[in-house]
Image (tube, rainbow, N blue to C red):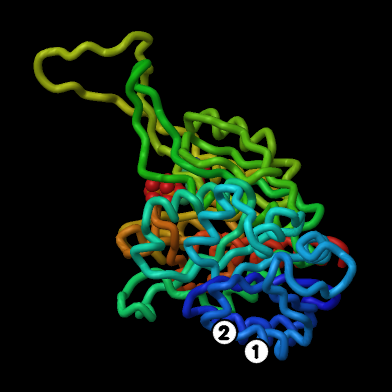
Amino acid sequence: MLNNKTVVLGITGGIAAYKSAELVRRLKKKGAEVFCVMTESAQQFITPLTMQTLSQNPVFTEMFGKVHHWNVEHISLADRADLLLVVPASANIIGKVSSGIADDLLTTTIMATKAPILMAPAMNVNMYQNPVTQRNIKNLKELGYRFVAPGCGDLACGYQGQGRLADLDVIMDTVEGLVEDNKPLDRKKVLVTAGPTCESIDPVRYLTNRSSGKMGYAIAREAHLMGAEVTLVSGPTALKPFSGVKLISVRSAQQMYEAVLKNFEDSDIVIKAAAVADYKPSEEANDKLKKQGGDLVLKLTRNPDILAELGQQKKSQILVGFAAETKDVINYATEKVKKKKLDFIVANDLTKEGAGFASESNIVTLIFSSGEVEKWPQMSKNEVARKILSKAANLSKEKECEGIG
Ligand code: CTP
């Protein structure tokens, strides 16, 4: 619920502006106080009167317009907000905020607020995919801004592709998660692993895999937002961890093993999203290997199975594994749950479009130690992360209750 919460809703110009009317209705239904700030272009698509009627509050449209009360408008709105939403967020507003431009009421309010900011972009697919827009979104994400990615389908401009405003259900879930006082992972310690490992052959060469680390980083970020104290043990990736997440950088499976084991006892929930190399070269050459005539045979030695070791050592921790498969997903993943003594495993089929390593989204199936199987639809990695964490939080709570009972 959003009782006693103030949501400032920024509306920018785009056909999806009409959906902000429904969003206001839903926010109000959940108990939020809503103030709308509309840009000039937004008013071409939907009238302030509509938003005023639905929000039951004055609508703010001008930087230097009629004074509603004695406070400076953008500062007062910025201070009052528990959450600042921008729905729909045009390429223009994303670009302006990313560049630090504050030239109207909405951009100045965004600049002045300390509340979390959530943007739901909606635009033409080519505008969304434009590297400038993508770079601006990436920059803002790194600064802690949150985004609900647009969905795919028919766009008002006649194009097809990613650009339509995300489902209002998804926006509402994200809003609730963000302003939640009752954080489900409060006082919990969550240990996450992410990325690939690199196994050195010589000083310049190594064996690795295609893991981008995105899933693990999303889990670390969401766990932090859900109130947990998060340690992220990561192999080499191009990603920056969310601020507030403690990062331990490692390279090899052996280094990951040591870092994870060191932090295991203290953890309540462990999520092993890393793609750990099962083998490493038996010998690491001190000098760069020189080519010889004929073939080169590389002898490999088994790396420790970190998760299996955690399964052996586990006491009250909730242990979650990942299984990346290319066939027989459920069978292989079920075996791993048993073998590694997991509470559940998140299995994905790497051959599916919209799933796996480099993708922004994932399509996963959860398999629990009880044998229960849950298939989830395609979701962004952040959404998958949040849902995995909610499951783990519930199991952790159940275990706590068993302990007390
Ligand atoms: N894992 C691990 N240590 C390893 C290998 C895997 O901790 N040396 C963990 C992964 O982080 C993941 C889970 O085990 O959470 C499953 O990894 P996966 O590579 O899918 O399976 P493996 O156990 O390596 O089995 P296989 O390679 O036969 O599929």
Residue that lies at the very extreme toward the top in this rendered image? 287
Residue assigned mark 2: 46
Q: Residue at x 41, y 38 (%)?
A: 278
Residue 87, image quadrant = bottom right
* Residue in front for this viewpoint, 383 or 58: 58
The yes-or-no answer for disc 1 within 8 Å of ligand 1 is no
Can you give x and y, in whole percent of width and height, for residue 358 in the image? 38, 51
Residue that lies at the very extreme toward the right in this rendered image? 70
Residue that lies at the very extreme toward the left in this rendered image? 294
Quadrant in which the N terminus appears: bottom right
The yes-or-no answer for disc 2 within 8 Å of ligand 1 is no
The amino acid beneath tag 1 is Thr
Task: Count neighbours of disc 2 (C-alpha within 10 A) and say few if under 14, some if 14 to 19, many if 20 or more.
Answer: many
The amino acid beneath tag 2 is Ile
Q: Residue at x 39, y 73 (%)?
A: 152
Whether label 1 touches label 2, CB < 8 Å = yes
Residue assigned mark 1: 50
* Residue in front for this viewpoint, 331 or 90: 90
Can you give x and y, in whole percent of width and height, for residue 100 in the image? 60, 48
Q: Residue at x 50, y 36 (%)?
A: 235
Q: Residue at x 75, y 42 (%)?
A: 266
Q: Is residue 210 above or below residue 318?
A: above
Badge 1 element: helix
Does residue 57 appear in the picture of this structure? Answer: yes
Can you give x and y, in whole percent of width and height, for residue 120 in the image? 55, 68
Badge 2 element: loop
